[in-house]
Amino acid sequence: MSVGLLFIQLITFLCLLASLFSSFSFKVQAATLMADPNIVMNGDFSAGIESWYPNGCEAFVVSSDPFSSEAMTANSSNCGYVVVTNRKETWQGLEQDITTRVSPGINYTVSACVGVSGPFHESAEVLATVRLEHQDSPTEYLFIGKTYASRDKWVDLEGTFSISNMPDRVVLYLEGPAPGKDLLIRSVTVRSSTSSDFQETEENKEASSVFPPAFNIIKNHDFSDGLFSWNANSCDSFVVSSNDCNLESYAVVNNRSDTWQGLEQDITDRVSPGYSYKVSASVSVSGPVLGSAQVLATLKLEHESSATEFQLIGKTYASKDIWKTLEGTFVVSGRPDRVVFFLEGPPPGIDLLIKSITIHCESDNPFERSREFCSAPESDYHIFLNSSFSDGLNHWSGRGCNLMLHESLADGKILPHSGTCFASATERTHKWSGIEQDITERVQRKLIYEASSVVRLSHSHHTVQATLYVQYLDQREEYIGISSVQATHDDWVQLKGKFLLNGSPARAVVYIEGPPPGIDVFVDHFAVKPAEKDTPTRRPYIESHAFGMNIVSNSHLSDGTIEGWFPLGNCHLKVGDGSPRILPPLARDSLRSTHGYLSGRYVLATNRSGTWMGPAQMITDRVKLFLTYQVSAWVKIGSGGRTSSPQDVNIALSVDGNWVNGGKVEVDDGDWHEVVGSFRIEKEAKEVMLHVQGPTPGVDLMVSGLQIFAVDRKARLSYLRGQADVVRKRNVSLKFSGLDPIELSGATVKIRQTRNSFPLGSCISRSNIDNEDFVDFFLNNFDWAVFGNELKWYWTEPEQGNFNYRDADEMLEFCERYNIKTRGHCIFWEVESAIQPWVQQLSGSELEAAVENRVTDLLTHYNGKFRHYDVNNEMLHGSFYRDRLGSDSRANMFKTAQELDPLATLFLNEYHIEDGFDSKSSPEKYIKLVHKLQKKGAPVGGIGIQGHITSPVGHIVRSALDKLSTLGLPIWFTELDVSSTNEHIRGDDLEVMLWEAFAHPAVEGVMLWGFWELFMSREHSHLVNADGEVNEAGKRFLEIKREWLSFVDGVIEDEGGLDFRGYHGSYTVEVVTSESKYVTNFVVDKGNSPIDVIIDL
């Protein structure tokens, strides 16, 4: 071949090679461009914590692996990891603003490599969350994903999110471990997903951005926490682990001498009858394997009174060094005593390898998923057997009574409500006697159940109640009221309610009780089944309205006629002269326009033959749903009837025939008095009538200047925030020392408050502390506790000499373990209906001795344990002890309590002080009671306002607080709760009350009367649903807590200091100089005067 030809071929080859390289280079570039970049800045912390922000805590970067003895080198695959420390709340963690790097409608995949550190052994939950901040609406939180990290292993946290509309700010953050545990983060990536990664429908995308994936009921599913929660069944096991996020641990089950030997986990408390569960496991085998070996997933169902059952879930054939997926499903029927999941199968001598196991409750609808379990199995799954008596009385029994079955009664006048028959509980010997069914084998803890029945009485009318009796494994007993209804002889009525078990029962029985002995209770059907999940409420639409404008027609009677008014009943109305010419005081500051002075005229109602008679007018078209209205008027009684006793005057509404309280005052002289109150209507009404009523028949009633107007909540909150700035903050001057002034000058400073020192607590019950979800929310959000019933006399000594301090002891031990301060509620209760029968039956001298024994036993048993005591509850509403032991008995209770526990602050405690709803408990009467007690030497130390309030109005609450503050004693809201069918409105009300308390200088603490659904004294007052989901009112509560924290960024001045104004409480400060970073803590104590804080760096 010639040289020329070779040269031509060489040139051709080089051109082809160049073309190939060019094509390859293009493909590499294209692949690089197609790979979505990480939208998180400094995702590997190679630039320290630049672009990251520790939220209310501290963070720093280190370069050595905490899970390895070797330090990282410069060539390590990771430049370091961040430590998030000094965490006081679970939500405190590391965050980054990603607003400018995300867009609506795009799916983003999140991946983080995380760990935890601290003085603990159990694994800790780590969550990834997105916060969406809006200028004109509440902040939203999107759950991305979670994992369980242990202190010796890096683990992956993965999830996805998308946003539908662009908020004002988007923040990604990692949070979750309990306070005191450090969060470690090695890397964070967020990438937009390509179409091949996500092929979900829009509906699924929207759901996945709000709801987490189905909960894996297997603990330590990937063996990241060793063999925690696992048990090797008659063999040995160990874990082969890795410290690298990209390499997974796995369990080795060896020394197996039989095929059924393997690894098992008890899942009794995490499965429920009737549910379908999906199992997936990654398995392999090792050892002398010829070909492949069978691996099985099995369910073991153990019964105390019958043989153990085994249920095959699924199987696969695994080969050596190859991981296989084993899948299957199972449903638990009945209620076994123990449910155990285990993997078994290979022949003896072959090791079973297990990488991971997941068990998910199957559900196509993400809205049906609760925090830990599916909310309900199939809708026709019933806990009660034979609920309609189609099988006679089988499965039913009589609780202190006999049961009978009827097709009809009373010559056919009483027929079944549905079906062909009904049951009756006859020969009842006690109020608690009734029909019952044992559901022990079929009920599950931490699941919501609904009980429903249709009931009727043989004669008369009484309250009928459905009750759950529970006996726990430790022999504790509990009675849980499910629901009650007023039943009659005339017709069937529905009895319906929900319940939840916090702990695992040894025995659970549901029964119907209530009427006195001798009254038969008829039951048409009685069913208990898992409850359906409630639909979250939306913020209601409120029609156009004007705040502060009076909706009462002809209120001022300016033309001298009663036009717009009519007499309710056969009383007579006319116009009189001589009433006050100024607006009632509480209306004066609230109304937008005062219209100058009043006319001095009033409506006079005479010839009243009923207490309900008085002036009225229809206001149906003037009342808007879900608006809070303030009520204020001048009222007076005349000399008619010649009564000298105090008279109640009530501003009331009749809403489709139902009475609504708008305010009440007691009048006992011939002067004009202001009556104040409020109301809100939350259901569409056909007819709303305003009327004034109250005095006894024959007593003339006068009304002047009646004002009803919508309240501007937002304007009030703006004012309260300004007040709180004065009352709860102080000027702070940080003085930095320990560094060269040159280095210090110009250094950046980040100040983050970790805890506000304003006391915030909640009511708890003994069973609540058995629920891990309840405990988690409580410990993360409160620093005080009060026991709902467990310290009351009827609980600690239900029968004379039979003492029960066990529940309170266990609750107190719980509080002490977590450094929760406690209030003692209550030593005595003055209301007769709250006093146990044996006490009511004592003679005078016996009662005096019993009272002395009660206070001595209680305060000796708990000496120094409770910071506060409510000494004698509700003395304005009851007089049992005073009537029997004399007027000095109340003061003596205080004196004895102080002698026994001199460090405790002794409180009075009353309700309706702050809202104007109750003429018995006005602020003036409360002040008078305190003065009487003090005059008799009672060491009163504090004023308790319970705060069970509906439609709160800030001006009315503030007025009561101002009056009570003249006593010079600390004021606490001791039992605060608000109630609304709408969660958003409930949050509004709670916001008003918390800010009114926080902004008043005399208020020194707030106790909520619970927060968990089904464990509240009032309906529609909970902040957390029974399944553990924080509702809209609860989210508002958390937002308020965050708002009560101060955050400041600044630069150190030439004088070496930084000034700011912040809330009282605990802080962390981070100082970054040109050479280093310094983090330390400090406290801003309660006070108003400026304070200097020395920060030694």
Image (tube, rainbow, N blue to C red):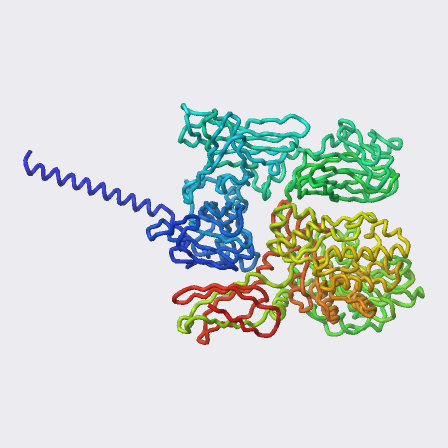
Q: Is residue 471 left or right of residue 694?
A: left
Relative image position of residue 591 (x, y in whole percent): 70, 68
- Which quadrant: the N terminus? top left
Given the current orientation, which residue lies at the most extreme top position?
A: 290
Given the current orientation, which residue lies at the most extreme bottom position?
A: 1055
Q: Residue at x 45, y 66 (%)?
A: 1071
Relative image position of residue 1068 (x, y in whole percent): 52, 63
Relative image position of residue 139 (x, y in whole percent): 55, 56
Instruction: Identify which residue, 252 or 292, lies in the foreground.
Output: 252
Residue 401 lies in quadrant: top right
Relative image position of residue 2 (x, y in whole percent): 5, 35
Given the current orientation, which residue lies at the most extreme right position?
A: 642
Residue 868 lies in quadrant: bottom right
Q: Residue at x 62, y 38 (%)?
A: 269
In the displayed structure, 161 sits above or below 252; it is below
Q: Is residue 936 left or right of residue 344?
A: right
Q: Is residue 622 visible?
A: no
Given the current orientation, which residue lies at the most extreme left position?
A: 2
Q: Is residue 194 visible?
A: yes
Instruction: Identify which residue, 1057 or 350, lies in the foreground.
Output: 350
Instruction: Identify which residue, 81 or 548, lies in the foreground.
Output: 81
Q: How many marks?
A: 0
Q: Residue at x 46, y 52 (%)?
A: 184
In the displayed structure, 30 sits above or below 290; it is below
Q: Residue at x 42, y 53 (%)?
A: 81
